[in-house]
């Protein structure tokens, strides 16, 4: 399933369909704001770092979480990852074991993250975070969760694909946003723009009024030991922006 083409229009030219779907976007925004207004969430005894985004997908949250837990591990900090486990059947909290669980049980992203750090999934993020804390986590890293009020955050990082930016600047279904840009960035401490220098420059030009710190990053493949030379393979991608996977490959 492809995202609607008009989602990628410049903010100044959202398109006719975006304008027609505006009333539904207002309902989505109202429901999201009401959910987020419920409170600050459960406060842990250890720091909680949230890696989230404002768009419907494909921003680069999971690679960012991997890079973050690797850097924490290099400093001797025991970081555990918490995820909702989208697409999985288990309610949790449960620690993901990559050799025992399947994507149908815990979701595909937690299965990938479990190869890099202890990873917990639960429908209730706070319950998963408590389990991680009890298991010895010195830092809890949330994979997604910016729009989830169940757990108090000490640091919130918003990840954006610099090539796509925030699309036409409209909320679902009129655009790709989970919530208005101003709402999401007001709860964030840092914006991480992932892409080439040219893409990051275009993104900053399209969104010049962002007040919080903006840091640039790029995607790079990790050495895996796979014998790529002469390997015949079928490449398939089901991520938010499949072209990023093929470019990396």
Image (cartoon, grey):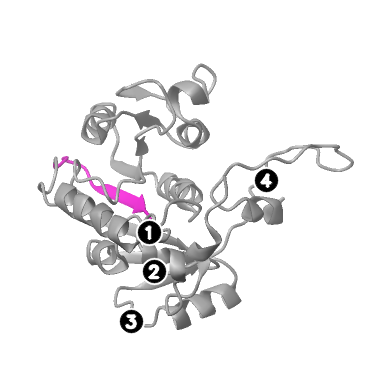
> In this orientation, does residue 151 appear?
yes
Which residue corresponds to the image point at 14% horizontal and 43% vertical from the top-left? 41
Q: Which mark is residue 209?
A: 3
CB under 8 Å between callouts 1 and 3? no
Magenta stretch in the rendered image: 43-53
Identify the residue at horizontal 43%, vertical 80% (top origin): 12
Image quadrant where one finds the N terminus: top right
Q: Which residue is mark 2?
A: 169
* Camera-nearest residue between 119 and 249: 249
The mark that comes first in sequence, 1 or 4, is 1
* Between discs 2 and 3, the one toward the N terminus: 2
| Mark seen at residue 223 | 4
Disc 1 target residue = 177
Residue 160 is covered by the magenta coloring: no
Asked whether 24 or 54 is in front, the reply is 24
Is residue 167 visible from the viewing direction of this image? no
Residue 70 x, y percent position in the rendering? 47, 46
**Number of other residues with Cα within 10 Å of mark 1, as a class: few under 14, some 14 to 19, many 20 or more:** many
Contact flag, marks 2 and 3 (Cβ < 8 Å): no
In terms of image quadrants, where is residue 239? top right
Rounded to the nearest whole Å, what is the CA distance between mark 4 and mark 2?
36 Å
């Amino acid at each position: 399933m492809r995202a609607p083409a008009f989602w990628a229009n410049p903010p100044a030219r959202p398109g006719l369909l975006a304008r027609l779907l505006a009333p539904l976007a207002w309902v989505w925004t109202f429901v999201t704001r009401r959910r987020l207004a419920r409170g600050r969430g459960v406060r842990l005894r250890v720091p909680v770092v949230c890696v989230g985004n404002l768009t419907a997908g494909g921003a680069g949250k999971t690679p960012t979480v991997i890079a973050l837990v690797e850097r924490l591990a290099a400093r001797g900090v025991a970081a555990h990852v918490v995820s909702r486990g989208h697409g999985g059947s288990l309610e949790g909290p449960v620690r993901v074991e990559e050799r025992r669980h399947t994507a149908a049980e815990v979701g595909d992203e937690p299965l990938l993250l479990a190869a890099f750090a202890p990873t917990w999934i639960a429908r209730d993020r706070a319950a998963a975070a408590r389990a991680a804390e009890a298991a010895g986590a010195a830092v809890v890293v949330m994979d997604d969760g910016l729009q989830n009020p169940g757990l108090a955050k000490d640091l919130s990082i918003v990840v954006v694909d610099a090539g796509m930016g925030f699309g036409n600047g409209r909320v679902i279904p009129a655009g790709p946003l989970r919530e208005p840009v101003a709402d999401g960035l007001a709860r964030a401490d840092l914006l991480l723009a992932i892409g080439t220098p040219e893409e990051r420059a275009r993104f900053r030009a399209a969104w010049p009024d962002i007040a919080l710190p903006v840091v640039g990053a790029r995607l790079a493949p990790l050495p895996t030991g796979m014998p790529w030379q002469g390997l015949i393979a079928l490449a398939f991608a089901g991520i938010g922006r499949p072209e990023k996977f093929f470019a990396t490959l």
